[in-house]
């Protein structure tokens, strides 16, 4: 990812990907929050790029969404790392 991209833009892109994965799984943000023992608003803020996202959050979300392709998980984890810089 280009180093001149704003961290907020990076978070939004990552959030869009996570929302897409959730929707492909047919889950609501409430269902995901319940599974992860977090608030629905946290899931919403992550997906909207309004909250910084950790690699752990990405890993946990990928687990809930049953993402089995390690390349996708690794790419999302890298996006999370880049979004924090």
Image (cartoon, rainbow, N blue to C red):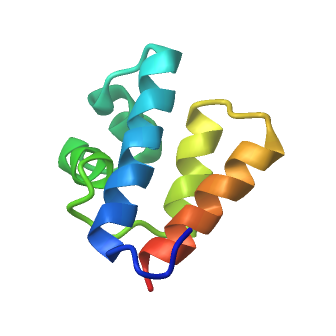
Q: Residue furthest bottom?
A: 85
Front residue of this view, candidates 59 and 83: 83
Q: Which residue is painted at 41% across and 66% down in the image? A: 53
Residue 74 screen position, x and y as percent = 73, 57
Front residue of this view, candidates 33 and 71: 71
Residue 32 screen position, x and y as percent = 40, 34
Front residue of this view, candidates 59 and 70: 70
Residue 67 screen position, x and y as percent = 69, 34
Q: Which residue is painted at 18% across and 48% down in the image? A: 41
Please tell me whether residue 29 is drawn above or below residue 55 in the rendered image. above
Front residue of this view, candidates 74 and 30: 74
Tag count in the figure? 0
Q: Which residue is painted at 69% across and 49% down in the image? A: 73
Q: Which residue is painted at 22% across and 53% down in the image? A: 45
Specify the quadrant of the image occupied by residue 72. top right
Instruction: Locate the N terminus by quadrant.
Output: bottom right
Relative to 39, 60 lies left or right: right
Residue 69 screen position, x and y as percent = 79, 37
Specify the quadrant of the image occupied by residue 16. top left
Please tell me whether residue 8 is drawn above or below residue 69 in the rendered image. below
Relative to 51, 81 lies left or right: right
């Amino acid at each position: 990812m280009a180093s001149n991209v704003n961290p907020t833009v990076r978070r939004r892109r990552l959030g869009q990907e996570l929302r897409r994965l959730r929707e492909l799984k047919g889950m609501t943000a409430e269902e995901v929050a319940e599974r992860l023992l977090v608030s629905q608003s946290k899931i919403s803020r992550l997906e909207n790029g309004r909250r910084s996202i950790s690699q752990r959050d990405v890993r946990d979300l990928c687990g809930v969404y049953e993402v089995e392709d390690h390349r996708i998980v690794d790419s999302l984890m890298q996006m999370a790392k880049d979004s924090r810089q």
